[in-house]
Image (spheres, rainbow, N blue to C red):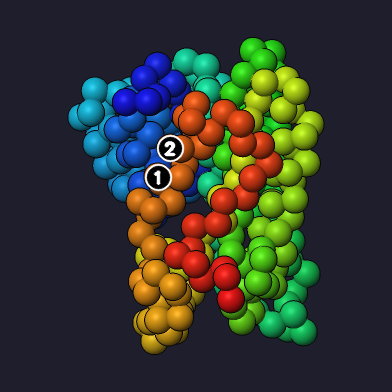
């Protein structure tokens, strides 16, 4: 119970890595507010599980590419559970696969907005509160794609996630002296809806076979790192992008 008394805000917390992280943070003692976009039933199920642990919880529907919405999310979260100590900027996605030569500018911009701009807006809203208190923890979500370019047709996603990694390092330098820790996570192949939608069983098996750990990751593998970064055990980490991929990134 390393996070007793802490209050966390998890973006995209209704499924996959966000769900696992919301539950893991609560298990360690944190109250949790999570955002979602379309998974209202799943979001309420996560809230119920957290409350069953004796923690406070609430779900908020939010389009985090809108600055006004990002601000409102923090206002509602503070009203529900109090000042936010930890923010996991987990919102993002691929949208669709598309070769660069065929990619409409709109799709490129959507990829940047969904993955990079949402992270910027969430961090900006968080810092307006954390800087006044001179404490807080921000965890961003990058990807192995940021380092290896991603799979076919994912240049917009990989580029945005690479920018998230760079933004994380820049932000860590900017706000570290104010008592705010900023680090990121870059998962590889994790068994989530993302890969159910944008990958094939055969390709997933091929990736798992060439991974030193010889398996896909589970959402809980990433959630364990989220809990670590939110805890005081990570007090001397700043600007790190922790790769959670079973060694796949070594190749």
Give the percent coordinates (x, y) of residue 234: 53, 33
Q: Which mark is residue 10?
A: none
Question: Mark 1 packing: few (<14 Cα in 10 Å), some, or many (20+)?
Answer: some
Q: Residue at x 59, y 24 (%)?
A: 136
Query: Dot 2, how many residues are within 10 Å of its Cα: few (below 14), some (14-19), or many (20+)?
Result: many
Image coords of residue 191 (percent x, y): 37, 65
Q: Quadrant of the N terminus?
A: top left
Residue 54 seen by the camera: yes
Q: Position of residue 60 (x, y in %)?
A: 45, 35
Q: Which residue corresponds to the image point at 47% horizontal and 15% vertical from the top-left? A: 82
Q: Which residue is mark 1?
A: 224
Tell me, yes or no, if residue 116 can be seen here. Answer: no
Q: Which residue is mark 2?
A: 227
In the image, 90: left or right of 190? right
Residue at the image position 30 percent from the left and 33 percent from the top: 27
Q: Secondary structure at mark 1?
A: helix
Helix, strand or loop under label 2: helix
Compared with residue 32, is residue 117 higher up or lower down, i.e. above or below? Answer: below
Where's the C terminus, which quadrant?
Answer: bottom right
Q: Nearer the viewer, residue 229 or 24?
A: 229
Q: Are discs 2 and 1 less than 8 Å apart at CB? A: yes
């Amino acid at each position: 119970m390393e996070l007793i008394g802490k209050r966390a805000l998890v973006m995209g917390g209704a499924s996959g890595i966000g769900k696992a992280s919301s539950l893991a943070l609560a298990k360690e003692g944190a109250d949790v507010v999570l955002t979602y976009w379309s998974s209202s039933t799943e979001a309420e199920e996560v809230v119920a599980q957290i409350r069953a642990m004796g923690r406070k919880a609430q779900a908020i529907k939010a389009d985090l590419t809108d600055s006004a919405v990002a601000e409102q999310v923090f206002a509602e979260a503070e009203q529900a559970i109090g000042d936010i100590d930890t923010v996991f900027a987990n919102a993002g996605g691929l949208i669709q696969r598309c070769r660069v030569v065929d990619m409409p500018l709109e799709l490129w911009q959507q990829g940047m907005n969904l993955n990079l701009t949402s992270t910027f807006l969430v961090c900006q809203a968080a810092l307006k509160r954390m800087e006044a208190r001179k404490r807080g923890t921000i965890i961003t979500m990058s990807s192995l794609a940021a380092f290896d370019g991603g799979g076919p047709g994912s240049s917009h996603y990989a580029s945005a996630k690479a920018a998230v990694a760079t933004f994380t390092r820049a932000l860590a330098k900017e706000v570290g002296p104010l008592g705010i820790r900023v680090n990121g996570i870059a998962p590889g192949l994790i068994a989530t809806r993302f890969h159910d939608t944008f990958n094939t069983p055969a390709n997933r098996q091929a990736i798992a076979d060439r991974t030193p750990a010889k398996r896909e990751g589970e959402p809980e593998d990433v959630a364990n790192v989220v809990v670590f970064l939110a805890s005081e055990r990570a007090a001397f980490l700043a600007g790190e992008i922790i790769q959670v991929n079973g060694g796949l990134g070594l190749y």
